[in-house]
Amino acid sequence: MVKWKHIVILGLLVATYTPINAAQLDEKMFEKLSPKEQVAFVLSCLQARDQLLDSFSCKLTVKKRNVEIATGRDEYDFPMEKYELYRSGDTSLLHVWLFSKDGDLQTEWRQRWDGKERRAISVPLKKEERPSLAISDTESSVVGGIGYNLLLGYRVGGDPAVSVSRWIGLPVEVNRNSIEVSIDHSGKDPLLLVHIREFGYDHFRFWFDPTRDYLPVRFKMWNSTDKNEKSYVNWTTDEAVEVKKIGSVWIPMKVIRQSGQRDSSHDCTQWTYTVEQFTLDKPTPEKLDITVPADTTVNDTVHKEIYVLHGDGSKTFMNFYDPSTSKIVSATQQAAATQASATSTRPTVVPPATLPAAKPAGK
């Protein structure tokens, strides 16, 4: 479980270091800082960037393919994917389209997360299909799995998915073995390098560009089998190959992710994320909302209910399997519990009765 109290303690150090103009980074001053102070300095820069990204709208297209590592030659092309991500503070909405190789839409769904509750609704592609809504108290791992979000600094995959600044700020304890910050001079311009080691041989490296307000420009995950990182089980790299300053913040406009395994060292899977549109404007309420059509099947794991929500707001309950108890909760039990909760004071995130009024699809 994530222990946020350690981040608060580290935040006392972070407050000491105000992010300075990147072009004025004093390497000699930085190297005189203690290891904890160096981490705190990096976090202060990243948290300043987080504030600039408190509201944004982003449209992405994704091309996925298998490539030969040595030549970059295509071995297999996957169908196209499209994403739209809208954020306003703790509330975000992810809209996903998955296509066939022929370009036909295969899957469409939306996910809304407000920091406490997730609502994900599938959009039926055929008239005879019924829409379905899933309600849970965890953010989907899909958000953290989108490679672009990592170099944006918005989300790192995991449970739970968190921002890059929060993930780097996690404490060194049982699972996390070490965190080191250094200045990398291997390229044209110096970059701040953060190296994190977990579970003994799992290595994570982030490169931040001081000349672009500490934008994450590169990432590498190396799941090694020895301390010297000479052998590995799998690896992932991300690189921002195109960046642009929008308003007062630098944004990755094109990101390439590659991922491979030990058993197939000659090739890898490559994702190319291309930004079609990015704005720092606060999304409209409509962009952050999910409309629930009439006769949607609702699977609510928060309140352990499953039912069909009709256009008049009434519900037809169905048997619900509770994985925490490995038991079936009957439709009758759910209906009785829902009626009892109407007059009880038990804490709930969002009672099922407050689902948006059902609207005809397409309106």
Image: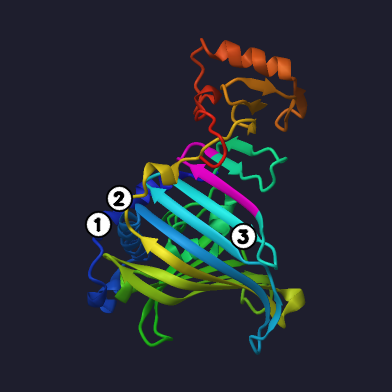
Q: Earlier in the sequence, mark 3 or mark 2?
A: 2
Whole-angstrom CA distance, mark 2 to mark 1, is 7 Å
Q: Which mark is residue 335?
A: none
**Prevailing SS of the magenta stretch:** strand
Q: Is residue 88 magenta?
A: no
Q: Can see residue 239?
A: yes
Q: Nearer the viewer, residue 77 or 330?
A: 77
Above or below, comparing residue 344 to residue 133 in the picture: above
At x 58% / y 53%, what residue is drawn? 142
Looking at the rendering, the stretch of residues picked out in magenta corresponds to 107-118
Q: Quadrant of residue 223?
A: bottom right
The residue pinned by badge 3 equals: 199
At x 77% / y 29%, what residue is drawn? 326
For this view, does 78 lie left or right of residue 236?
A: right
Across and down, in percent, residue 47 comes to: 34, 57
Across and down, in percent, residue 111 comes to: 54, 45
Disc 3 packing (10 Å; few <14; some 14–19; many ≥20) = few
Disc 1 marks which amino acid?
Answer: Thr
Q: Which mark is residue 12?
A: 2
Q: Secondary structure at mark 3?
A: loop
Q: Is residue 112 magenta?
A: yes
Disc 3 marks which amino acid?
Answer: Phe
The residue pinned by badge 1 equals: 16
Disc 2 marks which amino acid?
Answer: Leu
Whole-angstrom CA distance, mark 3 to mark 2, is 27 Å
Q: Quadrant of residue 232?
A: bottom right
Above or below, comparing residue 338 to residue 245 in the picture: above
Q: Quadrant of residue 40?
A: bottom left
Above or below, comparing residue 277 to residue 362 in the picture: below
